[in-house]
Amino acid sequence: MTNPAPLSVVSLASCRGSIAVVRTTGHTGTVKSRQRWSIAVILSALAIVAPGAAFADQPSVAPADADDAPPAPPPPPRAPARRAPAPPQLPAPPQLPAAHADAPAQLPEVKGAETKKEPTAEERAARGVVVIERAGQTVSLGAVLAGDGRILAALSPLGSGNDLEARFADGSVVRVKLGHHDRTWDLALLVPQSGRWTEGLVASSRDPIRQDAAIRSFTLAKGKPAPMSMVIRGRRNLIGADDAALPNAFELGSRVSPLDLGSPIVDEDGRVVAVLTRGCAPNEGRPCTPVAFGTPISAVRGFLRTVPASAVAPSAWIGIQGVAETGSFAKGVRIQSIHPDSPAAEAKLKGGDASVSDMIVAVDGVPVTSPEALAESIRTHAVGEKVPLTVFGQGKYRQVVVALRQAPDPRAAVKAPPAHPAELPTLGDAPHPAPAPRSRAPKR
Protein backbone atom coordinates (compact mmCIF):
# COMPACT_ATOMS: atom_id res chain seq x y z
CA MET A 1 0.00 0.00 0.00
CA THR A 2 1.52 3.09 -1.06
CA ASN A 3 1.57 6.13 1.17
CA PRO A 4 -0.82 8.73 0.10
CA ALA A 5 0.57 11.90 -1.29
CA PRO A 6 1.63 14.36 1.29
CA LEU A 7 -1.27 16.39 2.34
CA SER A 8 -0.72 20.12 2.48
CA VAL A 9 -3.14 21.95 4.69
CA VAL A 10 -3.18 25.71 4.78
CA SER A 11 -5.06 27.20 7.74
CA LEU A 12 -5.77 30.76 8.36
CA ALA A 13 -5.85 31.81 12.00
CA SER A 14 -6.85 35.19 13.12
CA CYS A 15 -5.65 36.50 16.46
CA ARG A 16 -6.25 40.18 17.32
CA GLY A 17 -6.04 41.16 13.63
CA SER A 18 -3.00 38.90 12.88
CA ILE A 19 -3.01 36.02 10.32
CA ALA A 20 -0.94 32.88 10.90
CA VAL A 21 -0.34 30.25 8.16
CA VAL A 22 0.13 26.70 9.49
CA ARG A 23 1.36 23.90 7.32
CA THR A 24 1.65 20.30 8.45
CA THR A 25 3.26 17.37 6.68
CA GLY A 26 2.85 14.05 8.34
CA HIS A 27 1.98 13.28 11.92
CA THR A 28 5.26 14.01 13.60
CA GLY A 29 6.01 16.94 11.44
CA THR A 30 2.53 18.13 11.93
CA VAL A 31 2.91 18.16 15.73
CA LYS A 32 6.24 19.90 15.66
CA SER A 33 5.02 22.30 13.08
CA ARG A 34 2.00 23.15 15.21
CA GLN A 35 4.20 23.73 18.23
CA ARG A 36 6.42 26.06 16.29
CA TRP A 37 3.45 27.91 14.81
CA SER A 38 1.78 28.16 18.24
CA ILE A 39 4.89 29.78 19.67
CA ALA A 40 4.99 32.18 16.73
CA VAL A 41 1.33 33.05 17.18
CA ILE A 42 1.85 33.75 20.92
CA LEU A 43 4.87 35.94 20.21
CA SER A 44 2.89 37.82 17.56
CA ALA A 45 0.06 38.37 19.97
CA LEU A 46 2.43 39.68 22.62
CA ALA A 47 4.04 42.03 20.10
CA ILE A 48 0.61 43.48 19.28
CA VAL A 49 -0.72 43.75 22.84
CA ALA A 50 2.42 45.31 24.41
CA PRO A 51 2.34 48.61 22.46
CA GLY A 52 -1.38 48.98 23.18
CA ALA A 53 -0.72 48.72 26.91
CA ALA A 54 2.11 51.23 26.75
CA PHE A 55 -0.13 53.92 25.16
CA ALA A 56 -3.24 53.08 27.07
CA ASP A 57 -3.45 56.78 28.10
CA GLN A 58 -3.45 57.94 24.48
CA PRO A 59 -6.83 58.37 22.74
CA SER A 60 -7.77 55.33 20.67
CA VAL A 61 -8.24 55.72 16.93
CA ALA A 62 -10.97 53.61 15.28
CA PRO A 63 -9.65 51.24 12.59
CA ALA A 64 -10.52 51.81 8.97
CA ASP A 65 -12.88 48.82 8.98
CA ALA A 66 -14.83 49.10 12.19
CA ASP A 67 -16.74 45.88 11.56
CA ASP A 68 -13.62 43.69 11.26
CA ALA A 69 -11.70 45.37 14.17
CA PRO A 70 -11.99 43.71 17.57
CA PRO A 71 -13.37 45.89 20.34
CA ALA A 72 -10.64 47.92 22.09
CA PRO A 73 -10.05 46.97 25.69
CA PRO A 74 -11.27 49.54 28.22
CA PRO A 75 -8.47 51.83 29.57
CA PRO A 76 -7.27 51.09 33.07
CA PRO A 77 -8.77 53.29 35.76
CA ARG A 78 -6.74 56.48 36.42
CA ALA A 79 -5.89 57.63 39.89
CA PRO A 80 -7.57 60.92 40.69
CA ALA A 81 -5.12 63.83 40.42
CA ARG A 82 -4.34 65.65 43.63
CA ARG A 83 -5.24 69.33 43.52
CA ALA A 84 -3.44 71.98 45.52
CA PRO A 85 -5.64 73.38 48.29
CA ALA A 86 -7.30 76.61 47.20
CA PRO A 87 -6.05 79.72 49.07
CA PRO A 88 -8.46 81.16 51.62
CA GLN A 89 -10.72 83.78 50.13
CA LEU A 90 -10.49 87.22 51.79
CA PRO A 91 -13.74 89.08 52.30
CA ALA A 92 -14.28 91.82 49.74
CA PRO A 93 -13.89 95.40 51.09
CA PRO A 94 -17.19 97.08 51.82
CA GLN A 95 -18.48 99.34 49.11
CA LEU A 96 -18.86 102.85 50.43
CA PRO A 97 -21.79 104.86 49.10
CA ALA A 98 -20.79 108.04 47.30
CA ALA A 99 -22.89 111.16 47.40
CA HIS A 100 -22.48 111.51 43.65
CA ALA A 101 -21.51 109.10 40.92
CA ASP A 102 -18.41 111.16 40.11
CA ALA A 103 -17.38 111.65 43.73
CA PRO A 104 -14.16 109.83 44.76
CA ALA A 105 -14.44 106.93 47.15
CA GLN A 106 -14.14 107.98 50.79
CA LEU A 107 -11.70 106.14 53.02
CA PRO A 108 -13.20 104.66 56.19
CA GLU A 109 -12.23 106.37 59.43
CA VAL A 110 -9.70 104.49 61.55
CA LYS A 111 -10.61 104.23 65.18
CA GLY A 112 -8.09 105.87 67.46
CA ALA A 113 -6.58 108.03 64.73
CA GLU A 114 -6.19 111.62 65.86
CA THR A 115 -6.12 114.53 63.48
CA LYS A 116 -3.90 117.43 64.44
CA LYS A 117 -6.00 120.51 65.03
CA GLU A 118 -4.81 124.01 64.45
CA PRO A 119 -4.66 126.04 67.70
CA THR A 120 -7.40 128.59 68.18
CA ALA A 121 -6.75 132.29 68.65
CA GLU A 122 -7.30 131.87 72.39
CA GLU A 123 -4.82 129.00 72.57
CA ARG A 124 -2.21 130.99 70.65
CA ALA A 125 -2.72 133.98 72.93
CA ALA A 126 -2.40 131.76 76.02
CA ARG A 127 1.13 130.84 74.90
CA GLY A 128 2.11 134.47 75.52
CA VAL A 129 0.63 134.70 79.03
CA VAL A 130 2.96 134.11 82.00
CA VAL A 131 2.44 133.57 85.72
CA ILE A 132 4.38 135.95 87.97
CA GLU A 133 5.62 134.22 91.13
CA ARG A 134 7.58 134.99 94.27
CA ALA A 135 9.10 132.09 96.20
CA GLY A 136 6.85 129.68 94.29
CA GLN A 137 3.65 131.56 95.17
CA THR A 138 1.51 133.14 92.42
CA VAL A 139 1.48 136.93 92.49
CA SER A 140 -0.27 137.89 89.24
CA LEU A 141 -0.28 137.36 85.47
CA GLY A 142 1.60 139.05 82.65
CA ALA A 143 1.89 139.16 78.86
CA VAL A 144 5.05 138.73 76.80
CA LEU A 145 5.63 141.48 74.23
CA ALA A 146 5.98 140.00 70.72
CA GLY A 147 9.48 140.29 69.28
CA ASP A 148 10.75 141.73 72.56
CA GLY A 149 10.69 139.03 75.22
CA ARG A 150 9.94 141.47 78.05
CA ILE A 151 6.77 141.09 80.12
CA LEU A 152 3.97 143.64 80.57
CA ALA A 153 2.28 143.25 83.95
CA ALA A 154 0.34 145.11 86.65
CA LEU A 155 2.44 146.99 89.17
CA SER A 156 0.24 146.85 92.30
CA PRO A 157 0.55 143.06 92.95
CA LEU A 158 4.37 143.10 92.69
CA GLY A 159 5.04 144.82 96.01
CA SER A 160 8.71 145.78 96.20
CA GLY A 161 9.37 144.20 92.80
CA ASN A 162 12.18 142.02 94.15
CA ASP A 163 12.71 138.24 93.96
CA LEU A 164 10.25 137.79 91.11
CA GLU A 165 10.09 134.90 88.64
CA ALA A 166 8.04 134.28 85.51
CA ARG A 167 6.59 130.87 84.63
CA PHE A 168 6.09 130.41 80.88
CA ALA A 169 3.65 128.20 79.00
CA ASP A 170 6.12 125.31 78.78
CA GLY A 171 6.66 125.31 82.56
CA SER A 172 10.10 126.93 82.47
CA VAL A 173 10.80 129.53 85.19
CA VAL A 174 13.20 132.48 84.83
CA ARG A 175 14.17 135.27 87.13
CA VAL A 176 12.82 138.71 86.20
CA LYS A 177 13.62 142.24 87.28
CA LEU A 178 11.42 145.30 87.39
CA GLY A 179 12.75 147.43 84.55
CA HIS A 180 10.14 150.21 84.36
CA HIS A 181 6.81 151.10 85.96
CA ASP A 182 3.94 153.60 85.88
CA ARG A 183 2.07 154.10 89.18
CA THR A 184 -0.77 156.05 87.56
CA TRP A 185 -1.87 153.34 85.13
CA ASP A 186 -0.59 150.52 87.38
CA LEU A 187 1.74 149.16 84.71
CA ALA A 188 5.10 147.37 85.05
CA LEU A 189 7.68 146.09 82.59
CA LEU A 190 9.58 142.99 83.74
CA VAL A 191 12.90 142.03 82.17
CA PRO A 192 13.82 138.29 82.10
CA GLN A 193 17.42 137.70 83.14
CA SER A 194 17.93 134.61 80.95
CA GLY A 195 16.38 133.21 77.80
CA ARG A 196 13.91 134.88 75.51
CA TRP A 197 10.32 133.69 75.11
CA THR A 198 9.35 134.22 71.48
CA GLU A 199 5.57 133.61 71.56
CA GLY A 200 4.46 137.10 72.46
CA LEU A 201 1.30 139.16 71.92
CA VAL A 202 0.57 142.16 69.70
CA ALA A 203 -1.85 145.07 69.99
CA SER A 204 -5.29 145.12 68.40
CA SER A 205 -6.77 147.96 66.37
CA ARG A 206 -10.39 146.81 66.83
CA ASP A 207 -12.87 148.53 69.13
CA PRO A 208 -13.60 146.21 72.09
CA ILE A 209 -16.91 147.97 72.85
CA ARG A 210 -18.57 147.18 69.51
CA GLN A 211 -21.77 145.18 69.66
CA ASP A 212 -20.46 141.94 68.11
CA ALA A 213 -17.20 141.88 70.10
CA ALA A 214 -16.20 138.63 71.82
CA ILE A 215 -13.67 139.71 74.43
CA ARG A 216 -11.59 137.32 76.55
CA SER A 217 -9.29 137.67 79.52
CA PHE A 218 -7.28 135.03 81.39
CA THR A 219 -7.63 133.53 84.83
CA LEU A 220 -5.70 130.94 86.77
CA ALA A 221 -7.11 127.41 86.47
CA LYS A 222 -5.09 124.65 88.13
CA GLY A 223 -2.06 126.89 88.17
CA LYS A 224 -2.20 127.75 84.46
CA PRO A 225 -3.74 130.70 82.61
CA ALA A 226 -7.07 129.84 81.00
CA PRO A 227 -9.30 132.09 78.84
CA MET A 228 -12.55 133.43 80.25
CA SER A 229 -15.26 135.72 78.89
CA MET A 230 -14.93 139.39 79.72
CA VAL A 231 -17.63 142.08 79.58
CA ILE A 232 -16.57 145.67 78.86
CA ARG A 233 -19.36 148.10 79.72
CA GLY A 234 -17.79 151.20 78.27
CA ARG A 235 -15.30 153.92 79.04
CA ARG A 236 -15.09 155.76 82.32
CA ASN A 237 -12.79 158.25 84.04
CA LEU A 238 -11.18 156.61 87.06
CA ILE A 239 -8.56 157.59 89.61
CA GLY A 240 -5.06 156.16 89.64
CA ALA A 241 -2.22 156.34 92.12
CA ASP A 242 -1.44 159.70 93.66
CA ASP A 243 -5.00 160.79 92.75
CA ALA A 244 -4.04 161.07 89.08
CA ALA A 245 -6.85 160.91 86.54
CA LEU A 246 -7.31 157.87 84.31
CA PRO A 247 -9.26 159.13 81.28
CA ASN A 248 -11.15 156.70 79.07
CA ALA A 249 -10.37 153.61 81.11
CA PHE A 250 -12.40 150.49 80.26
CA GLU A 251 -15.07 149.76 82.85
CA LEU A 252 -15.50 146.02 83.34
CA GLY A 253 -18.72 144.13 84.01
CA SER A 254 -17.11 140.83 85.06
CA ARG A 255 -15.72 139.68 88.39
CA VAL A 256 -11.94 139.64 88.50
CA SER A 257 -9.67 137.76 90.91
CA PRO A 258 -6.76 139.76 92.38
CA LEU A 259 -4.41 137.07 91.03
CA ASP A 260 -5.62 137.80 87.49
CA LEU A 261 -4.29 141.37 87.48
CA GLY A 262 -1.79 141.93 84.68
CA SER A 263 -3.64 139.59 82.33
CA PRO A 264 -4.04 140.75 78.74
CA ILE A 265 -7.58 141.38 77.48
CA VAL A 266 -7.78 140.08 73.90
CA ASP A 267 -10.20 140.21 70.97
CA GLU A 268 -11.42 137.43 68.68
CA ASP A 269 -8.03 137.29 66.93
CA GLY A 270 -6.05 136.94 70.15
CA ARG A 271 -4.72 140.52 69.94
CA VAL A 272 -4.48 142.72 73.00
CA VAL A 273 -7.10 145.48 73.43
CA ALA A 274 -6.25 146.29 77.07
CA VAL A 275 -4.36 145.16 80.18
CA LEU A 276 -6.14 144.21 83.40
CA THR A 277 -4.98 146.61 86.14
CA ARG A 278 -6.28 148.17 89.34
CA GLY A 279 -7.62 151.70 89.96
CA CYS A 280 -10.20 153.51 91.99
CA ALA A 281 -13.78 154.50 91.15
CA PRO A 282 -14.72 157.95 92.50
CA ASN A 283 -17.62 158.32 94.90
CA GLU A 284 -19.15 161.71 95.68
CA GLY A 285 -18.49 162.60 99.29
CA ARG A 286 -16.86 159.24 100.03
CA PRO A 287 -13.50 157.58 99.48
CA CYS A 288 -13.05 155.96 96.07
CA THR A 289 -13.71 152.25 95.62
CA PRO A 290 -10.86 149.98 94.39
CA VAL A 291 -11.85 148.38 91.11
CA ALA A 292 -10.24 146.41 88.32
CA PHE A 293 -10.28 148.11 84.94
CA GLY A 294 -8.78 147.78 81.50
CA THR A 295 -5.83 149.99 80.60
CA PRO A 296 -6.40 150.84 76.93
CA ILE A 297 -3.76 150.24 74.26
CA SER A 298 -3.18 153.98 73.87
CA ALA A 299 -2.02 154.20 77.49
CA VAL A 300 0.12 151.07 77.11
CA ARG A 301 1.89 152.54 74.09
CA GLY A 302 2.54 155.76 75.97
CA PHE A 303 4.02 153.74 78.83
CA LEU A 304 6.34 151.76 76.54
CA ARG A 305 7.59 154.96 74.89
CA THR A 306 8.95 156.08 78.26
CA VAL A 307 10.94 152.92 78.99
CA PRO A 308 14.55 153.93 79.74
CA ALA A 309 17.45 152.44 77.85
CA SER A 310 18.60 150.67 80.99
CA ALA A 311 15.41 148.56 81.12
CA VAL A 312 16.71 146.07 78.59
CA ALA A 313 17.50 142.41 78.82
CA PRO A 314 21.14 141.67 79.72
CA SER A 315 23.37 141.20 76.71
CA ALA A 316 24.66 137.73 75.91
CA TRP A 317 28.39 137.27 76.45
CA ILE A 318 30.85 134.76 75.04
CA GLY A 319 34.08 136.09 76.54
CA ILE A 320 36.70 136.20 73.78
CA GLN A 321 38.96 138.66 72.00
CA GLY A 322 39.50 138.01 68.28
CA VAL A 323 40.70 139.38 65.00
CA ALA A 324 39.51 138.95 61.43
CA GLU A 325 41.55 136.44 59.42
CA THR A 326 41.37 134.90 55.97
CA GLY A 327 43.24 131.63 55.65
CA SER A 328 43.74 129.04 52.93
CA PHE A 329 40.79 126.93 54.11
CA ALA A 330 38.61 129.24 56.24
CA LYS A 331 37.63 132.85 56.82
CA GLY A 332 36.39 134.09 60.18
CA VAL A 333 37.45 135.46 63.55
CA ARG A 334 40.69 134.08 65.00
CA ILE A 335 40.53 133.76 68.81
CA GLN A 336 43.44 135.50 70.47
CA SER A 337 42.39 135.46 74.13
CA ILE A 338 39.64 133.89 76.25
CA HIS A 339 38.21 135.04 79.57
CA PRO A 340 38.94 132.32 82.15
CA ASP A 341 35.34 132.28 83.46
CA SER A 342 33.41 132.53 80.20
CA PRO A 343 31.19 130.39 77.94
CA ALA A 344 34.11 130.15 75.49
CA ALA A 345 36.36 128.70 78.20
CA GLU A 346 33.67 126.19 79.25
CA ALA A 347 33.30 125.09 75.61
CA LYS A 348 37.09 124.48 75.51
CA LEU A 349 37.74 126.88 72.66
CA LYS A 350 41.42 127.62 72.11
CA GLY A 351 43.05 131.02 71.80
CA GLY A 352 46.57 132.29 71.38
CA ASP A 353 48.96 131.72 68.50
CA ALA A 354 47.47 131.10 65.05
CA SER A 355 49.08 127.65 64.89
CA VAL A 356 47.05 126.36 67.84
CA SER A 357 44.07 128.71 68.24
CA ASP A 358 40.55 128.26 66.85
CA MET A 359 38.81 130.37 64.23
CA ILE A 360 35.05 131.01 64.61
CA VAL A 361 33.55 130.72 61.11
CA ALA A 362 29.79 130.87 61.81
CA VAL A 363 27.31 131.47 64.65
CA ASP A 364 24.20 129.30 64.44
CA GLY A 365 24.87 128.77 60.73
CA VAL A 366 25.41 132.49 59.96
CA PRO A 367 28.93 133.22 58.64
CA VAL A 368 30.99 135.79 60.56
CA THR A 369 34.08 137.35 59.00
CA SER A 370 34.89 140.13 61.45
CA PRO A 371 34.80 140.76 65.21
CA GLU A 372 31.96 143.24 64.70
CA ALA A 373 29.88 140.64 62.83
CA LEU A 374 30.59 138.09 65.57
CA ALA A 375 29.52 140.53 68.30
CA GLU A 376 26.31 141.36 66.43
CA SER A 377 25.49 137.67 65.97
CA ILE A 378 25.99 137.00 69.67
CA ARG A 379 23.77 139.97 70.62
CA THR A 380 20.86 138.53 68.62
CA HIS A 381 20.75 135.64 71.10
CA ALA A 382 19.61 135.81 74.71
CA VAL A 383 21.33 134.96 77.93
CA GLY A 384 20.84 131.27 78.67
CA GLU A 385 20.62 130.16 75.03
CA LYS A 386 22.80 127.35 73.74
CA VAL A 387 24.23 128.46 70.41
CA PRO A 388 26.20 126.25 67.97
CA LEU A 389 29.46 127.69 66.63
CA THR A 390 31.24 126.43 63.53
CA VAL A 391 34.94 126.41 64.38
CA PHE A 392 38.02 125.72 62.27
CA GLY A 393 41.16 124.58 64.08
CA GLN A 394 44.03 122.14 63.67
CA GLY A 395 43.18 121.72 59.99
CA LYS A 396 39.57 120.58 60.41
CA TYR A 397 36.06 121.93 61.02
CA ARG A 398 34.00 121.07 64.08
CA GLN A 399 30.86 122.30 65.83
CA VAL A 400 30.96 123.63 69.40
CA VAL A 401 27.91 124.55 71.48
CA VAL A 402 28.30 127.45 73.90
CA ALA A 403 25.81 128.39 76.63
CA LEU A 404 25.60 132.18 76.56
CA ARG A 405 25.28 134.14 79.77
CA GLN A 406 25.64 137.63 81.15
CA ALA A 407 29.13 138.91 81.75
CA PRO A 408 30.12 138.52 85.41
CA ASP A 409 31.23 142.15 85.46
CA PRO A 410 30.66 145.03 83.01
CA ARG A 411 34.44 145.35 82.84
CA ALA A 412 35.09 141.63 82.39
CA ALA A 413 38.80 141.05 81.97
CA VAL A 414 40.51 138.64 79.62
CA LYS A 415 43.72 136.70 79.93
CA ALA A 416 45.70 139.11 77.81
CA PRO A 417 45.11 142.76 76.89
CA PRO A 418 43.90 143.47 73.36
CA ALA A 419 46.71 143.39 70.83
CA HIS A 420 44.78 144.75 67.86
CA PRO A 421 42.27 147.65 67.63
CA ALA A 422 39.79 145.56 65.60
CA GLU A 423 39.44 142.87 68.28
CA LEU A 424 36.01 141.85 69.51
CA PRO A 425 34.95 144.19 72.32
CA THR A 426 33.74 142.75 75.59
CA LEU A 427 30.77 144.04 77.57
CA GLY A 428 32.42 147.32 78.49
CA ASP A 429 36.09 148.09 78.19
CA ALA A 430 38.80 145.88 79.56
CA PRO A 431 40.42 147.28 82.70
CA HIS A 432 43.48 149.33 82.02
CA PRO A 433 46.70 148.10 83.58
CA ALA A 434 47.85 150.08 86.57
CA PRO A 435 50.56 152.56 85.71
CA ALA A 436 54.05 151.59 86.75
CA PRO A 437 55.46 153.56 89.67
CA ARG A 438 57.82 156.31 88.66
CA SER A 439 61.35 156.10 89.86
CA ARG A 440 62.47 159.14 91.68
CA ALA A 441 65.82 160.61 90.96
CA PRO A 442 68.04 160.75 94.00
CA LYS A 443 68.36 164.08 95.59
CA ARG A 444 71.61 165.73 95.23
Image (spheres, grey):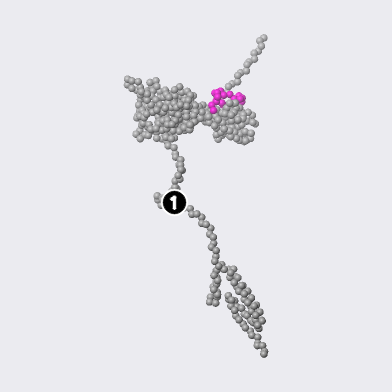
Q: Secondary structure at mark 1?
A: loop
The amino acid type, in three-letter code, at marker 1 is: Pro
Q: Is residue 136 visible?
A: yes
Residue 136 placement, left or right of 443: left
| Residue 413 lies in the magenta-colored region | yes
Reply above or below: 152 against 64.
above
Q: Image point 60% across, 73% down: which residue? A: 48
Reply above or below: 42 against 95.
below
Q: Image point 67% across, 89% down: which residue? A: 2
Q: Residue furthest top?
A: 444
Residue, disc 1: 94
Chief SS of the magenta region: loop
Residue 159 sits in quarter? top left
Image quarter hosting the C terminus: top right
Image quarter hosting the N terminus: bottom right
Q: Image point 43% across, 27% down: which residue? A: 140
Q: Image point 61% across, 34% down: which residue? A: 392
Q: Which residues are magenta?
A: 405-427
Q: Residue furthest left?
A: 284
Q: Residue furthest bottom?
A: 1
The picture places residue 132, in percent across and down from the top left corner, at 45, 27
For the residue carrying disc 1, how many other residues have a C-alpha within 10 Å: few (<14), some (14-19), or many (20+)?
A: few
In-front residue for pair 264/417? 264
Q: Is residue 152 visible?
A: no
| Residue 97 lies in the magenta-colored region | no
